[in-house]
Amino acid sequence: MFGKDAAYLSSPRPEYAETVGPTRSYVETGGGSQPGDPAKAARAILTAMSSATPPLRLVLGGDAIDRIRQRLSDLQNELSEWEGLGRATSIDE
């Protein structure tokens, strides 16, 4: 996926170095160093695509699953913390 010339990159912009810079660097230099097995990923994608109910999103890799689970937990906690205030904005009957 990140082989030489596999991705088109626009010119770097200093304004985005902090936010986009790490991803740009990974794409430029990460070829072959990804933690996942491409053959296993391809098989997983084919399995999901041939399913009667394929997922809208297929998360591949334990690291990705762990990050998403953490993000979901963070969102759940924030929702619970601010739920009362959000619900208080409903129109009174």
Image (cartoon, grey):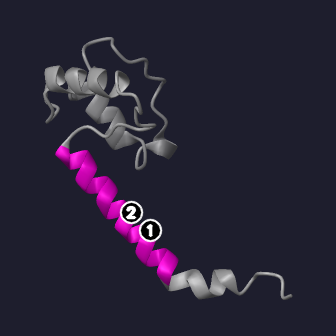
Specify the segment rendered in magenta: 62-80
Residue found at x 32% / y 42%:
22
Q: Amino acid at mark 2?
A: Leu
Quarter occupied by the C terminus: bottom right
Q: Residues within 10 Å of mark 1 (few under 14, many from 20)?
A: few
Is disc 1 placed on a helix, strand or loop? helix
Front in this rendered view, residue 90 or 12: 90
Q: Is residue 78 above or below residue 30?
A: below
Q: Is residue 85 above or below residue 55?
A: below
Q: Are marks 1 and 2 in contact (CB under 8 Å)?
A: yes
Q: Amino acid at mark 1?
A: Leu
Q: Quadrant of residue 37?
A: top left
Q: Quadrant of residue 68?
A: bottom left
Residue found at x 15% / y 25%:
40
Q: Name the side, left or right, on which 14 lies relative to 23.
A: right
Q: Circle 1 sits on which residue?
A: 75
Front in this rendered view, residue 88 or 16: 88
Residue 77 in percent (x, y) is at: 42, 77
Q: Residues within 10 Å of mark 2 (few under 14, many from 20)?
A: few
- From this viewpoint, which residue is outermost toward the front? 52
Any mark on residue 72, and which? 2
Any mark on residue 84, and which? none
Residue found at x 48% / y 44%:
16
Whole-number angstrom distance, CA of label 1 to CA of label 2: 5 Å
Residue 39 in percent (x, y) is at: 15, 20
Quarter occupied by the N terminus: top left
Residue found at x 38% / y 18%:
7
Residue 90 in percent (x, y) is at: 77, 81
Q: Is residue 50 above or below residue 85?
A: above
Residue 26 in percent (x, y) is at: 27, 34
Q: Is residue 64 above or below residue 52?
A: below
